């Protein structure tokens, strides 16, 4: 693993109607089978694992991610771009405000066995 901090941080604007400044703090280089863990103020964890074929971008959606009080959700913006977002449990109200302010559409929550089975059935 190698972390390269960006000093100064690269700043860029995102958002369609409401603009927000994002600060790019650095670059993390992972070798296959290395993992990095991000931790929230509430001590909830989010892991990214590098494999030789790509990345596990989340822990299991209805297992470890749920255990760490993070909810995966698939959303779409007005430009037909799709994103998987992780919402901290208890912050769904803030998330809904974000969804409304950015005119995003929730396609499906992916945080329970029931919701994932429904998604699976749609694809069969």
Image (spheres, helix red, strand yellow):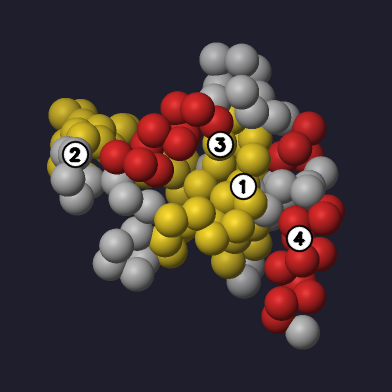
List the residue tagged with mark 4: 116
- Of the numbered discs 1 and 4, the one sitting upstream in the chain is 1
**Number of callouts in the render?**
4
Element under label 4?
A: helix
Residue 38 in view? no
- The correct choice, above or below, for 44 with respect to 101 in the image is above
Q: Where is residue 107 in the image (x, y as percent from the top left)?
A: 54, 60
Say left or right for 13 vs 34.
Answer: left
Few, some or many residues within 10 Å of mark 1 (<14, 14–19, 20+)? many
Per the model, the C-alpha gap separating discs 2 and 1 is 23 Å
- Of the numbered discs 2 and 1, the one sitting upstream in the chain is 2
Residue 11's quadrant in the figure?
top left
Per the model, the C-alpha gap separating discs 2 and 3 is 20 Å
Few, some or many residues within 10 Å of mark 3 (<14, 14–19, 20+)? some
Task: Identify the mark at residue 87; answer none if there is no mark.
Answer: 3
Element under label 1?
A: strand
The nearer-to-camera label among 2 and 1 is 2
List the residue tagged with mark 2: 18
Q: Position of residue 54 (x, y in %)?
A: 58, 66
Residue 21's quadrant in the figure?
top left
Of 23 and 13, which appears nearest the observer? 13
- Of the numbered discs 4 and 3, the one sitting upstream in the chain is 3
Q: Where is residue 114 in the image (x, y as percent from the top left)?
A: 82, 55
Per the model, the C-alpha gap separating discs 1 and 3 is 6 Å
- Of the numbered discs 2 and 4, the one sitting upstream in the chain is 2
Element under label 2?
A: loop
Of 108 and 49, which appears nearest the observer? 108
List the residue tagged with mark 1: 72
Of 87 and 98, which appears nearest the observer? 98
Task: Identify the mark at residue 80; answer none if there is no mark.
Answer: none
- Of the numbered discs 2 and 3, the one sitting upstream in the chain is 2
Few, some or many residues within 10 Å of mark 2 (<14, 14–19, 20+)? few
């Amino acid at each position: 693993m190698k972390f390269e901090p960006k000093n100064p941080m690269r700043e860029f604007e995102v958002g369609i109607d409401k603009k927000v400044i994002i600060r790019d703090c650095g670059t993390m280089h992972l070798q296959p089978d290395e993992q990095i863990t991000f931790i929230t103020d509430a001590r909830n964890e989010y892991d990214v694992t590098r494999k030789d074929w790509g990345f596990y971008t989340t822990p299991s959606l209805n297992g470890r991610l749920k255990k760490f009080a993070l909810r995966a959700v698939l959303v779409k913006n007005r430009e037909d771009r799709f994103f998987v977002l992780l919402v901290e449990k208890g912050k769904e109200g803030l998330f809904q405000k974000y969804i409304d302010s950015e005119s995003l559409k929730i396609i499906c929550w992916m945080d329970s066995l029931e919701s994932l089975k429904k998604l699976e059935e749609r694809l069969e």
